[in-house]
Amino acid sequence: MIDVQNITKRYGHHTAIDRVTFSVAKGEVLAFLGPNGAGKTTTMRILTCFMPATEGTARVAGFDCADQPLEVKRRIGYLPETPPVYQELTVTEYLTFVGRLRGMVGRNLTSALDQSIGRLELGTVRHRLIGNLSRGYRQRVGLAQALLHDPPVLILDEPTVGLDPKQIIEIRELIKSLAGSHTVILSTHILPEATAVCQRVVIISGGRIVAEDTPEQLSARLRHSEKISVTLKTPPIDCEGKLRAIPGILNIFSGQTTGNYLIECALGHDLRDEIARFVVSNHWGLLELRTISMTLEDVFLQLTRHEEDLSHSADASASSISDGAVVTQDTAS
Amino acid sequence: MTPVQALIAKELRGYFVSPIVYVVGAVFLLIFGFLSYLYIVFAGAQAIQLMQMQGGTAQINLNDLVFRNLFASMRFILLIILPILTMRLFAEERKLRTFEFLMTSPIGINEIVAGKFVSVFLVFLSLLGLTGLVPAVLMLFSDFDWNPVLTGYLGMALLGALFLAVGVFASALTENQIVAAFVSFGILLTIWLISGLGALLGDTTAGHVISYVSFMEHYDRLVHGLIDTSDLVYFGSSLALMLFLTHRVVESARWK
């Protein structure tokens, strides 16, 4: 549905995005993740035909963004960073204007209008001036605008900014419900959002794609060992040495608090059962025992921090203890 | 309703819900009314003078004494008023970040520029229509030739259209409305003053070319009741040029 090949965008000497290539299948929800200034908005602007790419081609629904912009624009619902609302219009007037701008007329327009107002729960404010609405409502009006003509492709630049927690959940549910029938690209720097809503994540940093996979795969790929945190009530002297008696343990670090230890073991070996039995039989007072999974946040930080050696570390599938130590420090900090 | 009509309707609504049209309209009509009053009183005083000198009823020509002066003064009034109407058209869209929305809507830049221009031109025409009250009232009390008045109105409409096109162009250049208004003042005053240079150079090729470029002589002929094709061509082509330049500026805004 969306196919981006080697697009580069330069502003003078500054390269905003550098040879970005990715594609999105029909019905897929893709998250664009990256720190501020990574090139998320620039990529979206190219896809929506707002600006042309310096090099490379972008195709949406089979139409080239540079050659057939009108065809592309007809098939896209776009929510820019700032909700594009006219303050002097009421919600209904604004959405009517948007619909007409997209060539909708008559009953077609009224039913689409009612549907999108219903979907975003704007019924109570439909006759109020947008200028008088709060940030959250404006954001929802912006989303209603993007959904109005039921476009096959939705491009949402930080769709949940400015919403309260309840609304954020509702909007996420809405986006999830669009999956399958609609192709969605959304950008965010809220990591749980990407995990919650998207089937695939593209991490972009410094204008380049640094990783692209499902959220689960991403964290698995960067995890080189299993890590278990254990907290003991009465740890003995030289607890670390004693724990090493359990077979399969690769490394032990003491944690931030007394009695807390981080145990590292080989990938695919869950030693929680053995550790529990060992600790209990020694009467050390087991308070807590849990695995530490690498969150998307850790993946993100690691990827965007260590950009240079990324290609090497992403390809390296074999576990290495020194790399593992870096991950542990990231996790613990 | 086509996309362009929707855009025009939205722009018109934008004008009429904001105070701009009311304030600009009130000032414009007030100045127009006051100037008409001054010229009519002045004409009346001249009539009384003539009566005292010649005796009996004196015939005064309202076309010469009132309308021609009034229309000539309108050049300056339009130059001051119209950039205020146009300054918001693109500058506001860019400031409020709705420009990106407009540019990603399935509507061409041609249509956007045309829609914006037509909407502000309609606002201007409605204000101009209200000034028709002055000749209408004068008609009740005196005789004058309507034809030069109508060509004067045609002149004002064409001159206004050109000023508005310059204003739309200036508005597309910036996201600051004050800057947009000032740039259009600057451009219009420069074109005005060029006619002085043309007059200075006199009957030379350069002089003729420069005088042709300025709107002064074209407008003056219409005010004098003369419809010349070359003047219509001047207004038509300069209008087209300004709108074309606006199109280029809007297009180039995408590249930044």
Image (tube, coloured by chain):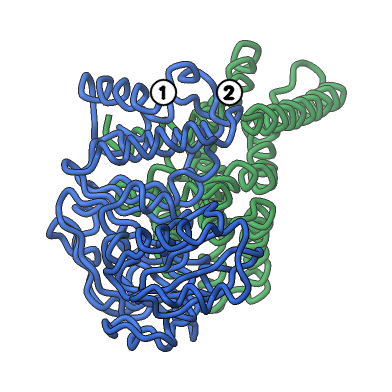
Chain colours: A blue, B green
- At x 64% / y 55%, what residue is drawn? B176
Q: x and y percent of residue A204 in the render?
A: 39, 70
Q: Can you say whether A183 is above or below A302 in the image?
A: above
Question: According to the image, label 1 marks what residue?
Answer: A121
Estimate how packed mark 1 is, as few (under 14), some (14 to 19) or many (20 or more) residues with alpha carbons within 10 Å: some
B12 vs B113, left or right, is right
In which quadrant is the C terminus of chain A drawn? bottom right
Give SS at disc 1.
Answer: loop
**Chain containing mark 2:** B
Question: According to the image, label 2 marks what residue?
Answer: B130
Q: x and y percent of residue A316 in the render?
A: 29, 85
Q: x and y percent of residue A12 in the render?
A: 48, 83
Amino acid type, label 2: Leu
Q: Can you say whether A42 is above or below B20 in the image?
A: below
Give SS at disc 2.
Answer: helix
Estimate how packed mark 2 is, as few (under 14), some (14 to 19) or many (20 or more) residues with alpha carbons within 10 Å: few
Q: Nearer the viewer, mark 1 or mark 2?
A: 1
- Residue B115 seen: yes
B11 vs A131, left or right, is left
The quarter holding residue B22 reads: top right
Q: x and y percent of residue A98 in the render?
A: 35, 35
Q: Can you say whether A279 is above or below B255 in the image?
A: above
Q: Can you say whether A163 is above or below A123 in the image?
A: below
A5 vs B44, left or right, is left
**Chain containing mark 1:** A
Q: Residue furthest top?
A: B140
Is there CB contact under 8 Å for labels 1 and 2? no
Amino acid type, label 1: Glu
- At x 32% / y 61%, what residue is drawn? A201
Closer-to-camera residue (A106/A33): A33
Closer-to-camera residue (A278/A56): A278
